[in-house]
Image (tube, rainbow, N blue to C red):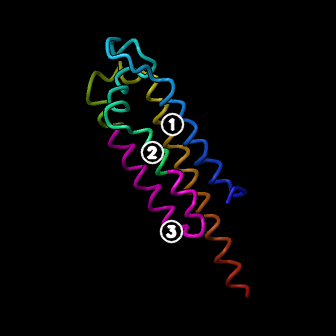
Amino acid sequence: MIQRIQTVYMVLLILINMFIVISIDSNPEMSLSESHFGFFRPYINDYFFSEFFCIFLLVIIFFFKKPKIQINFLRVLFVSLIFGLLNFFDERSFEKSITDPALLYFLVSFFLIFVSITSIKKDQAIISSSNRLR
């Protein structure tokens, strides 16, 4: 389980989300633009997005014997990030959205999920090729 590279990618995603949970200032009197993650802060605080994301990723990691389920769960996370990104750009102008640091979170998360899915598919290809040789 831990020797697989996709597990490392998923642990990186968990660490990023835990960093977001810890670093976002929960002071409601502070204006949204003053926080580290700008307008993305209410979605994390109100809906516990990062916490659910971390728990979901931990569950996915422990499904290492069922790669098809892992891929489907990662796709669900990918779609939820797409909806979060659309909501992120819907709230304000495009210029402010591009300069917000939360955009980096979305880009890194998309990349790590994509690379995890690709790694799982490579593992499946190796297993199926070894099964053909038997």
Give 104 or 44, whichever is nearer the viewer. Answer: 44
Q: Which residue is mark 3?
A: 68
Tell which tag, 3 or 2, sits nearer the viewer.
Answer: 2
**On the image, which quarter does residue 93 sit in?**
top left
Up-down: is 69 above or below 134?
above
Q: Which mark is residue 53?
A: 2
Of pointers 3 and 2, the one earlier in the residue sequence: 2
Up-down: is 52 above or below 22?
below
Residue lying at 31% horizontally and 30% vertically, measured from the top left: 89
128 relative to 33 in the view: left or right: right
- Give the overall secondary structure of the magenta segment: helix
Mark 1: amino acid: Asn
Near mark 2 (Cα within 10 A), the count class, few <14, some 14-19 or many ≥20, is some
Q: Are marks 1 and 2 in contact (CB under 8 Å)?
A: yes
What is the CA distance from the residue labelled 1 to the residue labelled 2?
7 Å
Where residue 109 sits in the image (x, y, percent)?
50, 41
Residue range highlighted in magenta: 57-84
In the picture, the quarter occupied by the N terminus is bottom right
Of pointers 1 and 3, the one earlier in the residue sequence: 1
Residue 69 drawn in magenta:
yes
